[in-house]
Structures are given as structure tokens and as C-alpha cells.
Amino acid sequence: PPQSQHLSTKRNPPERRNKRRHTLSLSLPLLQKIHNLSLPSSSSQGIMQRLPTGETVITPRNFKLLEELEHSEKGQGDMSISYGLVDSADIFMGEWNGGILGPHGTQHDSRFYELRISIPESYPAVPPRVRFVSRIHMNCVDRHTGEIVYNRVPATKNWNRSAGIENVLTSLRAEMASDANRRTRQPQEGSTF
């Protein structure tokens, strides 16, 4: 019989442990180079944590999204906004629905605005892509597509890894109540982009 049939199928536990230890000891600069990311080195952002060994741990995209989904499903946070997965079977958690209840005392009062939120692969290093489905007139929303203008929404303009979907929706609701948008005449309720 050939020699390969006589090879042992036993695993060598010490070698496996060493490989794991080596994999976990990748430094932040190496991770940045591998993923071509420009990440802040501060550990004060909640998503990044510096270990006693000096290594930095970054919470993966899906862990952060699961945390956000659980937060939303439990009804924690601002009750005038809502968000959740379009398809609960989507293991990549890429497409979300959002909703904002218009602030009292504005042209948006008692209106419910539907939004679509797309989560890029590089999230949370970059903000989600957000588009209004419900037609709305605001200075931070493209009048033709419903896409938000990222440099006009504080949560996306000043994005950091510890921010999330709720921050973006809350920021959009605050923009509805701003002096620039509170009295802006709105399209007929129920119209869409």
C-alpha cells in the first residue's frame, strides 16, 4: 500500500493552538493594511478595545449589527424612530427598513416617513446608505432620489465607529425640526420617490 495511507489522522493540539495564537495576535497596523482601512487608534469609541497586551480588538460588522437589531427589537432608545431587517433570514444583514415619526410643531407633525437603509461591507467604519422611500422636502435629502446628503446630516458628516443606524435616524428627525426644515412645505402624504 502507498505510504500516504499509513499517515496518522491524529491532530497535533499544540500546533493548532499556536496557529490560533498567531492569528489572534495580528496588530492593528497589519489589520489596517490587510483591509485597507483608516481606523482611529483611540480605544474610547466603544467598538475598539485595547487589550492589556497592547493589541486592539475591533468588533466585527455583524456583531455590531446584531447588537443594533436587538436594541431596536427590544424597543430601547428613541420611540419616534424604528428600524429592522427587511428579511429576517438575511445573514449578512445588508438591507434594513427604517421609520421616522415627524416631530410635533413642524410641517412633519404626525407624518410617518419610511426609509431604506443599506449597510455596506465596511460598516461601521463608514455610515450606512440611507434613502427616504416616502417623499419629503428637506435640505439634507436629494429631491429626486430621496438619498440623504451625507455632509448635511450631522450623524453622517461626523461619523465614527461607535455610531449606528439609530444615530442616523435620530439625526434626520432632529433635522426635520431644525429652522431650515421645520416650515418647509411637504408633498402630499403617502407619496413616494
Image (cartoon, rainbow, N blue to C red):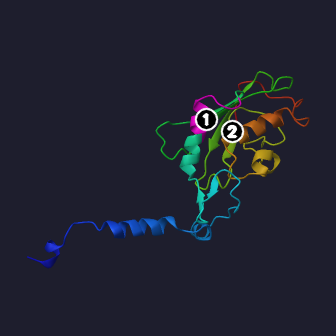
Against 158, is 189 above or below?
above
Q: Which residue is mark 1?
A: 71
Q: Residue 41: name its quadrant.
A: bottom right
Against 7, is 121 above or below?
above
Q: Is residue 121 visible?
A: yes
Q: Which residue is mark 2?
A: 166
Q: Position of residue 32 (x, y in %)?
A: 62, 67
Q: Position of residue 155 (x, y in %)?
A: 76, 46
Q: Nearer the viewer, residue 81 or 144?
A: 81
Q: CA separation, marks 2 and 1? A: 9 Å
Helix, strand, or loop for circle 2?
A: helix
- Residue 148 painted magenta: no
Against 47, is 72 above or below?
above
Against 192, is 30 above or below?
below
Q: Position of residue 103 (x, y in %)?
A: 80, 27
155 displayed left or right of 30: right
Mark 2 in CB contact with mark 1 (< 8 angstroms):
yes
**Circle 2: residue type:** Glu
